[in-house]
Image (tube, grey):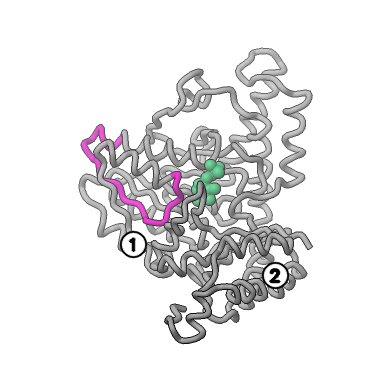
Amino acid sequence: MNIYADNAATTKMSRTAIEAMLPYMDGCYGNPSSLHSLGQRAAEALAKSRKDIAACLGAEPQEIYFTSGGSEADNQALISAAAAGERKGKKHIISTAFEHHAVLHTLEKLKKQGFEIELLDVGREGTVTAAQVEKAIRPDTCLVTIMFANNEIGSILPIAEIGALCRQKGVLFHTDAVQAAGHLPIDVKAQKIDLLSLSAHKFHGPKGTGVLFARKGVPLVNLIEGGAQERGKRAGTENIPAIAGMAAALKEATARMEENTAKVTALRDRLIEGLSKIPHSALSGAKDLRLPGNVHFCFEGIEGESLLLLLDEKGICASSGSACTSGSLDPSHVLLAIGRSHEIAHGSLRLSLCEENTDEEIAYMLAEIPKAVEQLRGMSPLWRDKINGKREFLL
Ligand SMILES: *Cc1c(COP(=O)(O)O)cnc(C)c1O
């Protein structure tokens, strides 16, 4: 069996997205800035995509800026809000300890430029309350940036409440909605969002394209200088095929959201219920306010990376959800933020589902994952010490 359960890392492109892209890679290859008819057809596709994406978010088309993805949108949102704050002498920024690195690393850069960064505690369930944000807001706060839903542990944050609070206090509010777009209802007006980032490849669109929503009147700083594309805020010839694919994918995901959510939530809950039976395991994140497709566990006594390789041999594509990239063995900052010890954080497994996963796949994973965990524990000297009472169990 071949199972793809890593949809939080990226998704398979939908047929709808591919078919929306093909005409702009083939016959209709014009540059939308060109005045001839081939260019104008591309310009029309660009305008239609902008309008369709705006409609999915409750935004106006002129509030949509196309970027190279979620990371760029996060960078531009934060740098723009910080610049606006600095002009008024406001240099305090509020965020959380478990944001994506596109946010956290941009905040580190801003810190070096003299901004004060306050990261709110996300507690054991991985969320923050509007009351926490309210307590942290000061007269010199220029930005609150809090993710819509967490990419590792799947918790969904109270965005509408935080948005209403920020609007009332006159503080700009950005949300990294990369894991939410196409999966959870977004309405930037109702949720009082000033800046929002999304990425096409997390909802069955193409990689390398995304959106920054900036509410009318929120001034943007451009990260890339050049031509006057995106109303002067993002230079470079637009990636028309990708943008058309993203718009088609978001439209489809939005139209099918209710149906997909029901299906994926049922699969998720079966998987959570079954994996909870593994001894010395713990579900990460909230039980209820959780992304439909997210399953995240820590298993004591194993290494997440070994588990991934073993599951890959069994045809299961999963993730440890941790930042064990570039040879670093640091456990995930998200798991540390919710209070997991280093030892437990190392034994993590994230399975992220989509509407294409099936009941048979869930049954297969429920048969194979406990066996794999047992096999790895059987090879671990640390685990033997725990069994023999020489070390304490943590979970
Ligand atoms: C994937 C992801 C990003 C980065 O988006 P890219 O388009 O890959 O740059 C940012 N934030 C979150 C929460 C993500 O899951």
Q: Is residue 9 above or below residue 260?
A: above
> Which residue does the numbered mark 1 point to in the structure image?
121
Q: Which residues are magenta?
A: 84-102
Density class for disc 1 (Cα within 10 Å; few <14, some 14-19, many ≥20) is some
Query: Residue at left 43%, top 69%?
Result: 125
Query: In what quadrant of the picture does the N terminus appear?
Result: bottom right
| Residue 225 painted magenta | no
Q: Does dot 2 land on a helix, a strand or a loop?
A: helix
Instruction: Residue at 22% x, 51% y: name it.
Output: 138
Q: Describe the element under mark 1 as helix, strand or loop.
A: loop
Q: Quadrant of residue 269?
A: bottom right
The foreground one among 335 and 262 is: 335
To which residue does mark 2 refer?
Answer: 365
Q: Give how far across and how far down residue 259 sits, in percent.
A: 69, 62
* Residue type, label 2: Met
Q: Nearer the viewer, mark 2 or mark 1?
A: 2
Point 43% across, 29% down: residue: 223
